[in-house]
Amino acid sequence: MQTRVTTLLGTRYPVMQGGMAWVAEYHLAAAVSEAGGLGIIGAANAPAEWVREQIRETKKRTDKPFGVNVMLMSPYADQVAQVIAEEGVAVVTTGAGNPEKYMELWKEKGIKVIPVVASVALAKRMERCGADAVVAEGCESGGHVGESTTMTLVPQVVDNLEIPVIAAGGIADGRGMAAALMLGAEGVQMGTRFVATTECQVHPNYKEKVLKARDIDTRVTGRTTGHPVRALRNEMTKKYLEMEAAGATAEELEYLTLGGLRKAVVEGDVKTGSVMSGQIAGLVKSELPCKEVIEQMMAETRQILKGAAQYE
Ligand code: FMN
C-alpha cells in the first residue's frame, strides 16, 4: 500500500510503531522495520549514549529505515538530538514540546521530522516550523494523552494541514487502520498492539495484563496536575485517583508514580507500577510476531477497503 507516508518513511507499509518509554528498544524497533513498518526507539528520559547504543544495535538487525522518538522535555534532549544527527536515522518523532531548535540540525542530515500532536493548533505550528508529517494522537492511546479522541482529532488535523497525517490512538487491526484512512490519515501509529508482540521485551506480567484487559480497564490519572496518563487499572491507579479526588498535591501524586513505568516494564510489578496502555488493549487477545501483526492488519485493511464499495 502506497501513500505519502510510505514515500516519506521509505517503508513498505504506512504503519509506525510508537516510541514508548522503557518499552520501545532495539529488538522491537528492528522487528517492526524488518516487517515493513517503521520501528521507533523510545528515547524518553534516557541518556544520549543509551540512545546511541540502541541505534547501533537496531542497525545490526535491520538495514531498513527506523526512527527515534525524542521527548523534548528530557534533560538529555540536546545531547540526544546530536546523537541522532551523528548516527543517522531515517525519522525522528517528537513529543512534549517544540522541536524547532533541532529542525536545522536534523534536516541537514536528511532526517524526517514527525511531531506527535493532540490538537489542531499544535499541528499547524509544527507544519509552520517545517515538520514533514504529524502523528495526530487521540486520547484513547496509552501513555500521556490529550483531550480529543482519534475519531474527532484526525479529520480536523487533516483539514488544516498540507503535510501527511498519521493517526494514532485506539488502532490495533485492519478495521482501525481502514477507519483512520477514511478519516483522511495516510498512515497509522500503534503502541499498545506492539506491546503484545513476541519481540517486545517487556516483562511477561505486563504483556499478560494487556492481553487480559477488557474494554473498560484503563484509567486516566493526572488530570488535576495537567499531565494526564492512560494506564491499565491497578492498585496504583486506584490509590492515585482516590488521592486526586481528595485534593492531593502534584508532589504527593508524583511520588506515587515515580519510576512506575520502569517498575512494571522491567520488574513486572503490575500492581503498584504504571502499566501504560491504550483503550484498545481490550481488542488485543494474542501475542504475535510483529510481522504477523502487520501482515494480518494490512490484509484486513485491503479487504475492508474493497468491501467499502457496497455502501455506494
Ligand atoms: N509516546 C511518545 O511520544 N513517547 C513516549 O515515550 C511514549 N511512551 C509510551 C509508553 C507506553 C507503554 C505506551 C503504551 C505508549 C507510549 N507512547 C509514547 C504513545 C505511543 O507512542 C503511541 O502513540 C500510542 O500508544 C498510540 O495509541 P495506542 O496505544 O492506542 O496504539
Image: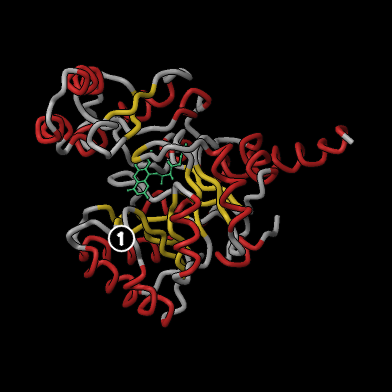
- Report the image quarter containing ligand 1: top left
Secondary structure under the numbered disc 1 in the rendered image:
helix
Residue occupied by mark 1: 54
Q: Quadrant of residue 278?
A: top left
Outermost bottom residue: 108
Front-lying residue, 174 or 133: 133
Q: Residues within 10 Å of mark 1 (few under 14, many from 20)?
A: many
Q: Position of residue 237 (x, y in %)?
A: 25, 22
Q: Is mark 1 within 8 Å of ligand 1?
A: no
Q: Residue at x 35, y 79 (%)?
A: 105
Residue 175 drawn above or below residue 290: above
Front-lying residue, 211 or 92: 92
Residue 237 drawn above or below residue 105: above
Relative to residue 269, is residue 282 drawn left or right?
right
Q: Position of residue 239 (x, y in %)?
A: 19, 18
Front-lying residue, 47 or 158: 158
> Where's the C terminus, which quadrant?
top right
**What residue type is disc 1 on?**
Gln
Q: Quadrant of residue 177?
A: top right
Residue 24 drawn above or below residue 89: above
Q: Residue at x 42, y 19 (%)?
A: 212
Residue 128 drawn above or below residue 35: below
Q: How many marks?
A: 1
Relative to residue 235, is residue 282 drawn left or right?
right
> Where's the N terminus, which quadrant?
bottom right
Front-lying residue, 59 or 230: 230
Q: Position of residue 252 (x, y in %)?
A: 10, 30
Relative to residue 223, is residue 236 drawn left or right?
left
Q: Residue at x 48, y 69 (%)?
A: 128
